[in-house]
Amino acid sequence: MRKLTLGSLFDGSGGFSLAGIICGIEPKWASEVEPFPIRVTSKRIPQMKHLGDISSINGAEIEPVDVITFGSPCTDLSIAGKRAGLDGSQSSLFYEAMRIIKEMRCKTNGEYPRYAVWENVCGAFSSNKGEDFKSVIEEFCKVKVEKVDIPKPDKWENAGEVLGDNYSIAWRVLDAQYWGVPQRRKRIFLVADFNGRSASEILFESESLRGHFTQSKKTGQETTGDTSKSARETSNICLNDQGGSRMDVTKGVTATLRAKSNHPPLVFDNHGRDARIKGPVDVAQTVVSLYGTGGNNQPFVLEKPRTFDIRLTSEGTVNVRANIYESDVSRTIDTSGNSPNSNQGGIAIVSSKDELRKGKQSTYSSSKNSHFTSAEKELASTLVATDYKDPPLVNVEDLIVRRLTPTECGRLQGFPDGWCDNLSEDNPSDEEINFWEKVWETHRQLISKNKRPKTRKQIIKWLSQPHSDTAEYKMWGNGVALPCVIYVLTGIAIQLNKD
């Protein structure tokens, strides 16, 4: 078998590139403009070349590949968006991808790429009353024929195919929750075979008939081994804020991850087996190396409940000598300064195990504003207009509400833990700094509102600590569900090796 190759446009989290590696297809190059995802994939897949902005790529000049994959921006196609369609500033980049495919095939006399894979939101079916998806299909057909007119049905089905003269196009909606990850994520996957009629075989053939697909699927399951722990066992109920338009409540599966970093899904955690309390005991358990690493790996001591009034200095530091004393009443919270507890004093409460247990069967609501968090038993706090940003949280019985961590979001997309780890570079070379100067400048011109380019000093500082939760949440929300992509690319790999 010859070595199969892949090019990834709008590469994002590197889902198509990683799936290609798992399926035996080598990723040669990628196009992406967001600095953080580029940093991630440049670390995880260092052999893959980064080409930058898609509009500056000439398909005739880059290395030819067997497969070109792309999930063009869905902003203008999504039901949650403004529905500008393929004419929107973001979704119109779809045509740039098609241009690159045509340029490469022209340069290679129709040999490369043999296949193209397009992934997008289901809103593409209804965008512009169905005309946009019609245009998508016709653009793929025009790679082979100059003129084509695909009839538009009243409603596009979730699966279908187009057969032409020695080419084929098929599409199918895949929902990630049925492919090994507990996330309700429906996406259109369209496969174009420009030199044959295998598109429908790739998308619709049974998994059991896929030859080595079992092996590939096993690899994918190993990378997502902890997914069920993060969303099924420890989190039975999930709340997913869909940008203020609605709150999805799901059980055992999260709603679709979104790119809005300020709206990560909320989960109710019961922590099951790892939160057992033993005691009281007179002798401490064995000291282990896991102490202090979180996850209830550290013993604790419970004392008699006491309330302390903690007086802080104007700098916000504790005045230990004179201003900490036991009290039954908290002092007034002064919200005039930058910190609500910097002047009149805050309050810290320590409760016993018995006191903690008393609240297990109660329901509390939590409401936040810019100065404090209030908690009410069996009573919701006043609803405010900004609830779409920070909606009230409810703690039911012994469940603890919290946000999904970025690592758990990665698991919900089927990626291995550690995909965003070890990204720092303390001593970058001049070549690396020059590369990142171009990356950041491209991002500034296309996306950022910054008026000035980043300096070398700023780039060096960013490289020393490129990770942030905000950037990782955004990357996962824009990414693809890895198991679904593995299924599609496995079918392509089998067909290419057959031929």
Image (spheres, rainbow, N blue to C red):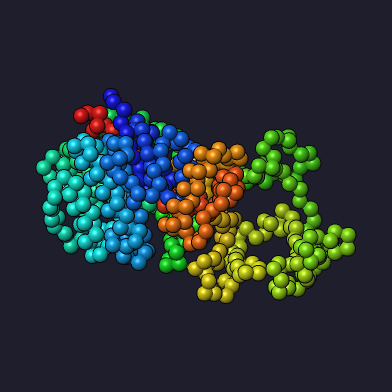
What residue occupies the far right of the structure in this picture?
321
**Depicted 74 relative to depicted 291: above or below:** below
| Front-most of residues 375 and 97 | 97
Q: Quadrant of residue 4?
A: top left
- Location of residue 93 in the rendering, given as x and y in whole percent from the top left corner: 32, 55
Q: Is residue 116 visible?
A: no
- Location of residue 474 in the rendering, given as x and y in whole percent from the top left corner: 47, 53
**Depicted 110 relative to depicted 80: above or below:** above
| Front-most of residues 135 and 389 | 135
**Depicted 7 relative to depicted 95: above or below:** above
Q: Residue at x 41, y 38 (%)?
A: 49
Q: Residue at x 22, y 36 (%)?
A: 108
Quadrant where the N terminus lies?
Answer: top left
Q: Is residue 5 visible?
A: yes
Q: How many marks?
A: 0
Quadrant where the C terminus lies?
Answer: top left
| Front-most of residues 75 and 275 | 75
- Location of residue 332 in the rendering, given as x and y in whole percent from the top left corner: 75, 73
Q: Residue at x 78, y 71 (%)?
A: 344
